[in-house]
Image (cartoon, rainbow, N blue to C red):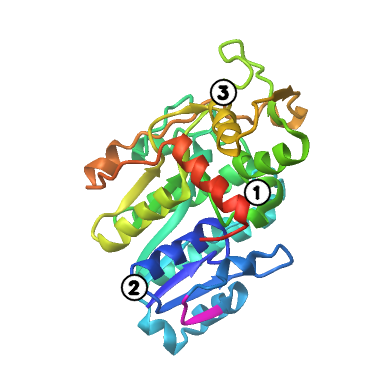
Amino acid sequence: MIVVTGAAGFIGSCLLWKFNSEGFDNIIAVDELDISDKQKNLSGKKIADYIDKDNFIKDIDANKNYLKKVKTIVHMGACASTTCTDAAYLTKNNVEYSKVLAKFAILNKKHFLYASSAATYGAGENGYSDDIDVAYKLNPLNMYAFSKQTFDLWVISNNLIDKITAFKFFNVYGPNEYHKGDMRSVVCKGYDEIRKTGKIKLFKSYKKEYKDGEQKRDFVYVKDAVNIVYYFFNHFEKKGIYNVGTSKARTWNDLASSLFESMKVTSKIEYIDMPQELKEKYQYFTEADIAHLRKAGYHDTFTELEDGVKEYVGFLEKNIYL
């Protein structure tokens, strides 16, 4: 039996789709279903049960019998808002909750895989290597990133790195993120914007080495992201922290151009002022170092940005889910 937390969320629900497509349906889906329409991500998924997050924590505390059947916990559940400033809330959801699951899994000899984030790399002054020695040098730029970094360091400091598998997701985009509001990818938000106004808005650059729209990110299609998680699910002997990115940074202008082309709309980009509160917390460049991933035996190619955007636009046009 498999437990997937955050199962109604973006990556979590796509992971359910991947498990189902590979023949797995003995899955316990754990999440918080609120007013954000996340439940639509569970539609059509084959699962054994759905359990509310708070009830699942109570079940762990009570060591309920059904937990003996669980072989693997894939922990995708977290508050993923990069603009959230409630440190107590992020600590409870992204750090303490993760500790409870990790301790339970390790004590009971379950496989434990969890979602970290490339946001932990901050401005990139220490590079983008997932090497453990680099982890202590990182300077996250926001509270969300700090919460992810805190749990990563807890794992490392407690010598658990050889007992778990962690994924530092870079800029993931794709179907099933529709409920995320402002936290949706620029592809998703841009699609709506172009349909309504015929143009897309991108932030101006405030660093001379980057022209407007030439800031770069490592954009990874969600199908590629869950393929990597599934690989390590099947190779549970491979532990550690792994970057989940393409190792090929692309500009926001590239992304916008791909979106316009896929929508068959003439390109029109408006560069807007960045909110003051974001200027010191903005990542101008990210690019995954995937040497560790390749060394672990994952050799699949990644979806090119243009191809991923084109396929995703097809999902958006028909309002369909994975």
Task: Say what secondary structure mark 3 lies in.
Answer: loop
Residue that mark 3 sits on: 215
Which residue of the protein is positioned furthest toward the front in this rendering?
264
Is most of the magenta stretch helix, strand or loop?
loop
Give the foreground label among 2 and 3.
Answer: 2
Residue that mark 2 sits on: 23
Q: Amino acid at mark 2?
A: Gly
Give the foreground label among 3 and 1.
Answer: 3
Quarter where residue 162 is shown = bottom left
Label placed on residue 81 = 1
Label placed on residue 283 = none
Labels 2 and 1: the sequence-earlier one: 2
Task: Say what secondary structure mark 1 lies in.
Answer: loop
Residue 56 at x, y percent in the picture? 55, 77
Quarter where residue 158 is shown = bottom left
Q: Amino acid at mark 3?
A: Gln
Residue 275 at x, y percent in the picture? 76, 29
Q: Amino acid at mark 1?
A: Ser
- What crowding class fits label 1: few (fewer than 14 Cα within 10 Å), some (14-19), or many (20 or more)? some
Do labels 2 and 1 touch, CB within 8 Å?
A: no
Q: Which residues are magenta?
A: 46-50
Q: Residue at x 49, y 52 (%)?
A: 151
In the rendered view of the protein, which quadrant contains the N terminus? bottom left
Give the foreground label among 2 and 1.
Answer: 2
Labels 3 and 1: the sequence-earlier one: 1
Asked if residue 199 lies in the magenta stretch, the reply is no
Above or below, comparing residue 256 to residue 303 in the picture: above
